[in-house]
């Protein structure tokens, strides 16, 4: 399908491109509805489905975060990661953070590791569960197709594709709230050949080898699931840590000293 492209990176130019794309779509599909799912969508429901606005609860932190922040902050790359501090920034800054570029090896979220391949799977799982958590199923079911004017081909994550996959699974009644990654991955079978499986955790190494690290009051540390924090109090049994994202937490001494790394 061809449409008139308006060059430029301004919001106005992108909105012009959305309209041009939708007009071209309507000529070929007069009875179908194309929903733009980005911050440049002319429809409120489309803007709500942008990963910048769509949120999912991380139960370990008891807070909601934009899908974009969760995905970017969970990346484990050759040179480092995950970068949980990105949970506390705005979605655009998280997406543009230079640390999130490079060869992707895995995703790490709430203490679990997830495979980077197929490249769409982790993102679509996070996105689909966010749609269900926010009760936006009907928005997807009422649309016939989805577009994402912001999508760059070099980025494997595309919310339009995630919407299409989620809608397909909804029409087949195969989705439920709070599905685990393992449950979600089992939905993706290709004949009898390919079944998506979690790569064993031992195949990935995040950070230094496990060892005991003793911290003092005032030290900054990185918790593998909670992110960056500063030691505020220490007793013979536990540490009280002020985390950047979730606030103060009291954790057992052995957990902190074996799982956290010094910053």
Image (spheres, rainbow, N blue to C red):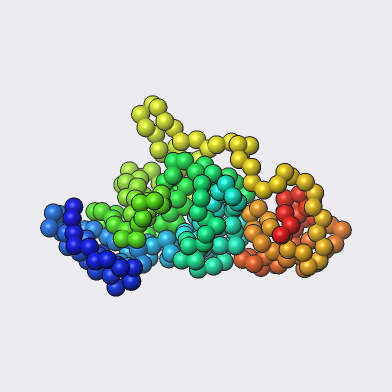
Quadrant of the rendered structure where residue 10 is?
Answer: bottom left
Tell me if 25 is positioned left or right of 12 in this view: left
Between 246 and 223, the residue placed more toward the observer is 223
- Residue 120 picture location, percent across and down: 42, 46
220 and 181: which one is in front? 220
Q: Where, quadrant-wise, is the C terminus in this rendering? A: bottom right
Locate residue 157, reporting x and y percent.
41, 52
Residue drawn 85% across and 62% down?
235
Expressed as whole percent of the image width and height from the top left, the position of residue 79 reads 59, 50
Image label count? 0
Viewer-side residue, 253 vs 90: 90
Horizontal side, residue 137 vs residue 246: left or right: left
Can you name the residue that lies furthest to the top here? 192
Q: Is residue 66 visible?
A: no
Residue 257's place in the image compared with 200, above or below, is below
Q: Front-most of 114 and 204?
A: 204
Tell me which residue sits at (38%, 62%) in the image: 50
* Residue found at x 38% / y 26%: 192
Q: Residue at x 75, y 52 (%)?
A: 255
Across and down, in percent, residue 51 comes to 42, 61
Q: Does the image show residue 117? A: yes
Q: 69 above or below 198?
A: below
């Amino acid at each position: 399908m061809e449409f008139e492209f308006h060059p430029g990176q301004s919001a106005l130019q992108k909105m012009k491109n959305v309209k041009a794309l939708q007009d071209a779509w309507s000529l070929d599909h007069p009875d179908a509805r194309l929903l733009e799912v980005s911050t440049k969508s002319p429809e409120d429901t489309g803007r709500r489905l942008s990963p910048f606005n769509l949120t999912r609860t991380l139960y370990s932190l008891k807070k909601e975060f934009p899908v974009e922040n969760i995905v970017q902050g969970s990346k484990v790359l050759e040179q480092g990661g995950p970068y949980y501090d990105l949970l506390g920034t705005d979605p655009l800054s998280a997406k543009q953070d230079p640390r999130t570029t490079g060869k992707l090896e895995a995703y790490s979220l709430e203490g679990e590791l997830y495979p980077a391949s197929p490249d769409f799977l982790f993102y679509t799982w996070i996105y689909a569960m966010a749609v269900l958590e926010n009760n936006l199923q009907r928005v997807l079911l009422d649309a016939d197709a989805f577009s994402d004017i912001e999508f760059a081909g070099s980025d494997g994550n595309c919310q339009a594709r995630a919407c299409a996959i989620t809608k397909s699974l909804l029409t087949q009644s195969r989705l439920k709230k709070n599905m685990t990654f393992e449950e979600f991955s089992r939905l993706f079978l290709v004949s009898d050949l390919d079944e998506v499986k979690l790569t064993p955790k031992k195949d990935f190494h995040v950070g230094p080898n496990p060892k005991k690290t003793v911290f003092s009051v005032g030290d900054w540390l990185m918790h593998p699931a909670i992110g960056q924090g500063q030691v505020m109090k220490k007793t013979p049994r536990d540490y009280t840590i002020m985390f950047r994202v979730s606030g103060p937490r009291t954790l057992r001494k052995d957990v902190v000293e074996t799982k956290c790394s010094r910053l």
